[in-house]
Image (tube, rainbow, N blue to C red):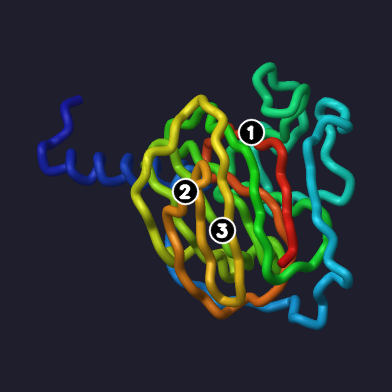
Amino acid sequence: MKQPMWQLPVVLTIAALAIVLGLFNLGLITIAGAGRAVVRYQSEDLASPPEPLAWSFDDVADGALVDGAEALSETRFGGWIVRAEADAPSLPNALCQTGVGEFPAIALGDAVLGDLVMTARFKPISGRVDQAAGLIFRVQGGGNYYILRANALEGNVNLYKYASGRRSLIKEASTRVNSGAWQELQVQVVGNHFTGLLNGAPVVEATDDDYTAGRVGLWTKADSVTCFDDVAVIPQ
């Protein structure tokens, strides 16, 4: 039976809402906006004395995680795993995120740091919605931290704040981020001032005052399949 013409817009609207809801539930689209920053760590919680940290993932068994690592969010169809990568900067292993989620994030250990230089090699492998790699720092918990993010599909390196599970943009910068290639991402953190570098070149900087200390980790977005290697953190 042919539907009346007036019903078609209603049917299309319902179908579009169903698609949007499905993508939202899979973490492939998100609602941006400022949340309330929940602070857990202060300067008195800083590691003393602060020691340099490094992860090459080469002494971790395939399919496992680094000792002390904590997944900060749930994913579907996969997750954070150490696996062999034939072109890893330091052979044989890399830490890869293979799942689908809103903002898959993992804390690497429980050391609380303030000022630091954090560097990692990353390779965006695939993703139809996003091909993102991020360094998270001053992590309070699963819903509160800062992110320096590179995105190969969008062609940018941005600084964000994650507060009570809501992500808000601090500063954005357009720049080429290569898909399928290893690159270097670095964040320099001094007081409330953050500088993001891609392959050694400064590309974005901004200030924010909400978090003064916290843990460090790695981050992706939506359906990004991304690998990381040679993560190094030098407290300042």
Q: Is residue 153 above or below residue 194?
A: above
The spot of residue 118 in percent (x, y) is 66, 54
- The answer to whether residue 106 is left or right of residue 30 is right
Q: Which one is nearer the viewer's eye here, 93 or 11?
A: 93
Is disc 2 surrounded by few (<14), some (14 to 19) or many (20+) residues within 10 Å? few
Q: Provide the secondary structure element on which disc 2 rests.
A: strand
**Amino acid type, label 3:** Ile
Q: Is residue 103 above or below residue 65?
A: below
Please identify, in this view, whether the residue under mark 2 or under mark 1 is nearer the observer. Answer: 2
- The answer to whether residue 220 is left or right of residue 41 is left
The spot of residue 72 in percent (x, y) is 71, 54
Q: Which one is nearer the viewer's eye here, 196 or 214?
A: 196
The spot of residue 77 in percent (x, y) is 65, 32
Let me know if residue 26 appears in the view: no
Q: Which residue is mark 2?
A: 201
Q: Provide the secondary structure element on which disc 3 rests.
A: strand
Q: Which residue shows up at 64% across the image and 33% down it?
A: 227
**Amino acid type, label 2:** Ala
Q: Which residue shows up at 49% across the image and 62% down it?
A: 160
Labels 2 & 1 near each other (Cβ < 8 A): no
Q: Is residue 197 above or below residue 151?
A: below
If the image is split into quadrants, where does the C terminus sit? bottom right
Question: Residue 227: which numbered mark, if any?
Answer: 1
Q: Which residue is mark 3?
A: 147
